[in-house]
């Protein structure tokens, strides 16, 4: 069976958490994926220009092993969803021709326990 396989990278501490989602047409077992990540980490450590080490490793895996880093730059469309009627709308994506343009969003992973909200 052919398909795509998803892999995730995590970086963080108690204050800030960063992650990257990677896609590949080939399935790697966990140990082989870890080897690739460790090799990529060695290549970029101390010399990366990305905002985070996770992004640098993800881009290195793209360049050297054919992974696709699924990040906001690859979005074709983004929609803000609201429970309120009329407040669900297309979010503005930044234009590749204007690198300074700010989008209306940035991905952020938040781990919330619904029981702690009350």
Image: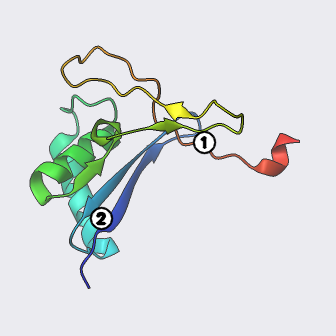
Between 19 and 107, the residue placed more toward the observer is 107
Residue at 60%, 42% in the rendered image: 110
Circle 1 SS class: loop
Give the class, few, some or many, for how many residues have Cα within 10 Å of label 1's Cα (few <14, many ≥20): few
Mark 2, secondary structure of its residue: helix
In front here: 40 or 50? Answer: 50
User: Residue 6, image x and y in percent?
Assistant: 35, 64
Q: Is residue 1 left or right of residue 62?
A: right
Q: Residue at x 26, y 75 (%)?
A: 27
Q: Quadrant of residue 97?
A: top left
Q: Which residue is mark 2?
A: 34
Label 1: which residue?
Answer: 110
Outermost residue to the right: 118
Residue 72 point in image, percent of width and height? 35, 38
Give the spatial CA distance, label 1 vs label 2.
25 Å
Say left or right for 44 vs 34. left
- As rendered, which of 48 and 93 lies closer to the eye? 93
Left/right placement of residue 6 relative to residue 37 reads right
Which of the labelled discs sits on residue 60, or is there none?
A: none
Of the image marks 1 and 2, the number of the one nearer the N terminus: 2
Within 10 Å of disc 2 (Cα), the crowding (few <14, some 14-19, many 20+) is few
Looking at the picture, how far across and down is residue 85, in whole percent? 70, 34
Specify the quadrant that holds the N terminus: bottom left
Q: Is residue 104 above or below residue 36?
A: above
What residue is drawn where x is 17% and y is 47%?
60
């Amino acid at each position: 069976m052919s398909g795509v396989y998803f892999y995730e990278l995590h970086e963080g501490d108690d204050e800030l958490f960063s992650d990257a989602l990677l896609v590949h047409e080939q399935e790697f077992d966990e140990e082989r994926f870890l080897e690739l990540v460790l090799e990529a980490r060695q290549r970029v450590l101390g010399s990366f220009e990305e905002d985070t080490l996770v992004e640098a490793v993800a881009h290195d895996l793209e360049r050297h092993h054919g992974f696709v880093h699924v990040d906001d730059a690859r979005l074709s469309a983004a929609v803000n969803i609201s429970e309120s009627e009329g407040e669900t709308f297309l979010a503005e994506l930044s234009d590749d021709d204007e690198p300074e343009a700010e989008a209306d969003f940035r991905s952020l992973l938040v781990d919330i326990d619904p029981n702690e909200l009350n």
